[in-house]
Amino acid sequence: MKIVALLKNLGLISLLLFVTGCLDSRSVVPVDVVEFVGKPTAGIDVKIVSVEDIREFQVRPRIPEIPSLPEDEVNNESIKARAIGRKRNGYGRAMGDVLLPEGQTVASVVKSSISNSFRQAGYRVLKKGDAQYNDAFPISVRVTKFWSWMEIKVWMQKLRNQSEVTIQGPLEKLKKGMTVSSGHEIPMAAVAMFDSEWQISVAQGAAALADRVAEELKK
């Protein structure tokens, strides 16, 4: 019995060490935004010419939904461009961060999301090399929020994503800028989350943002 108890304790210790290591380490996860397949063959032509990531980061924010990075990287523009979330332990203490892989940024994810929004709303989104590209209406996007965070309470554990963008262009409804916010949440398996949960949170958050923007464009 003592051996069994000892083995159980050793197993628990190993699990705790594993959990702590996972939380404390950096995760790099790719996120795919599936292109909306209902690309219209007719409609107003637009082109997304810029997506500017202007999110503000802090070192020790008072709430987890504020983007944060370690002190030695909070001003690193290349890291900030890829940062999508921050892990936390059961006490809410900030641990390892979550980044997109090199070559992918929050701006590129949002660009794909907003492209889907315009397609859903009946616009044609043109890319360089497409016919009529030069004559398409130019669209600019500013990303003020795009972040996933862990919400840990005794009775529930959730992974939340919050997004906010301002879209501007020469179209009538966009001349003064249209700001759209979106929120999304999924249940977490445990405090020791899998990287796949971050992927799901960001991908579904981007999809939810696309739907909200499309709704506003259709009005």
Image (tube, helix red, strand yellow):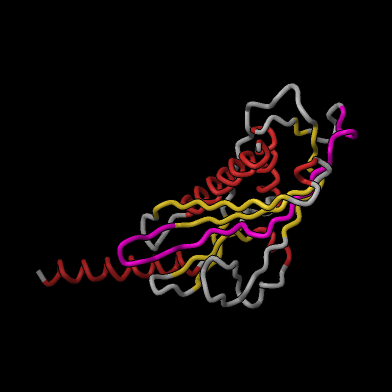
Q: Is residue 133 magenta?
A: yes
The magenta segment: 132-158
How many discs appear?
Answer: 0
Q: Position of residue 206 (x, y in %)?
A: 59, 47
Can you name the residue that lies furthest to the right here?
A: 134
Report the predominant secondary structure element of the magenta stretch: strand
Quarter of the image with the C terminus in it? top right
Q: Residue at x 15, y 66 (%)?
A: 4
Q: Is residue 158 left or right of residue 31?
A: left
When the figure is inspected, residue 108 is found, relative to residue 127, above or below; the finding is below
Q: Position of residue 214 (x, y in %)?
A: 64, 39
Quarter of the image with the N terminus in it? bottom left
Q: Is residue 202 left or right of residue 121?
A: left
Q: Is residue 5 left or right of residue 119?
A: left
Q: Position of residue 33 (x, y in %)?
A: 61, 41
When the figure is inspected, residue 195 is found, relative to residue 73, above or below; the finding is above
Q: Nearer the viewer, residue 171 or 48?
A: 171
Q: Residue at x 59, y 44 (%)?
A: 212
Can you name the residue that lies furthest to the left here?
A: 1
Question: Residue 37 sits in which quadrant?
Answer: top right
Q: Residue at x 61, y 42 (%)?
A: 210
Can you name the residue that lies furthest to the top here?
A: 41
Q: Residue at x 49, y 65 (%)?
A: 87
Q: Is residue 148 left or right of residue 114?
A: left
Q: Is residue 148 magenta?
A: yes
Q: Position of residue 148 (x, y in %)?
A: 53, 58
